Image (cartoon, rainbow, N blue to C red):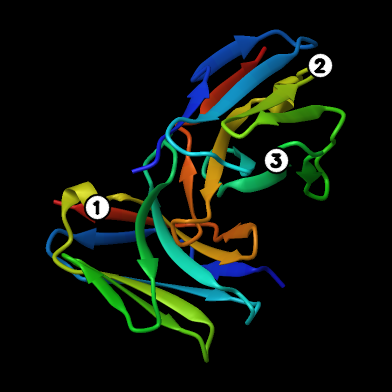
Amino acid sequence: RKEVEQDPGPFNVPEGATVAFNCTYSNSASQSFFWYRQDCRKEPKLLMSVYSSGNEDGRFTAQLNRASQYISLLIRDSKLSDSATYLCVVNRGNQFYFGTGTSLTVIP
Amino acid sequence: GAVVSQHPSWVICKSGTSVKIECRSLDFQATTMFWYRQFPKQSLMLMATSNEGSKATYEQGVEKDKFLINHASLTLSTLTVTSAHPEDSSFYICSAHRPSQAYEQYFGPGTRLTVT
C-alpha cells in the first residue's frame, strides 16, 4: 500500500468556486503533514503545514484527521492563479512521502 | 525563508557523458538533503537521502553506481549522473531538511537534464 494516496484529478473549476482536495496516509506513526504547490516545470513550494486543530491562511484551509488518517485542503473563491498541482506530503522521522499530486485548473 | 540553490538549472549532454548537479543550502546547515526525480506529469520520486559525512541511502531501484551522491559539507550535496542515457532525461530536484522548522523541507529550483 502506498504511503500517501491522493486523487490526481484533474479538477477543472470556474473562478470563484470552492474546491477541496483529500489525501490519505497509511502509517499512523506519521508525524508532520504539509501541502505543497507545484507549478509546471518548477519546484514544489510549501503552501501550508497541517495541524489537527486545523489551520487557515486566507482562502486556504487545511485539516488533519489522525483517526481516519486523512488530510484535506479547501480553497475558497478560486483564482486563476490557483491553477497548479497540489502535493500532499507526510513526514515520519527523516523521511518525506509525497502524494502523486492533484491537478487544479481554474477556468475564467 | 530558507533558500536552496541548484546548479546548473538546465543541461544538455550526449549519451555516455557524466553530469554533476550541485545542491546548496544558502542560509542554514543541512545534515540531510534529498534528491528527487520527476518525469513529466508525474509526482516527485525520491531517489536517495544524502547524509553529511556518510554514505547516501538509496531508494529501491535506484542504482547507486549510476547516481553518485556526495554530501561533503553541511551546505553542499552533489548528484552525478554517470554514463547518462536518454532515459535519464528528467527534472532533478534536491531539497534540504531543516529540523528546527517543524520538519519542513526546502526545495531547490530543480535541474532539467536532457540527454541526447
Relative height, residue B48 to residue A102 (above, below): above
Amino acid type of the residue tagged 3 in the rendering: Ser
A46 and B75: which one is in front?
Answer: B75
Relative height, residue B16 to residue B43 (above, below): above
Q: Distance between the residues labelled 2 and 3?
A: 21 Å
Q: How far apart are marks 3 and 1 (CA)?
A: 33 Å
Q: Give the crowd class for mark 3: few <14, some 14-19, many >=20 residues within 10 Å.
A: many
Give the SS element for disc 1.
Answer: helix
Residue indicated by mark 2:
B83
Question: To which quarter of the image does residue B102 belong?
Answer: bottom left
Residue indicated by mark 1:
A82
Question: To which quarter of the image does residue A79 belong?
Answer: bottom left
Chain letter of disc 3? B
| Residue at left offset 13%, top offset 65% | A77
Amino acid type of the residue tagged 1 in the rendering: Asp
Judge from the rendering whether residue B26 lies leftward or rightward of residue B17; answer left or right: left
| Residue at left offset 78%, top offset 29% | B67
Residue indicated by mark 3:
B50
2 and 3 marks on the same chain: yes
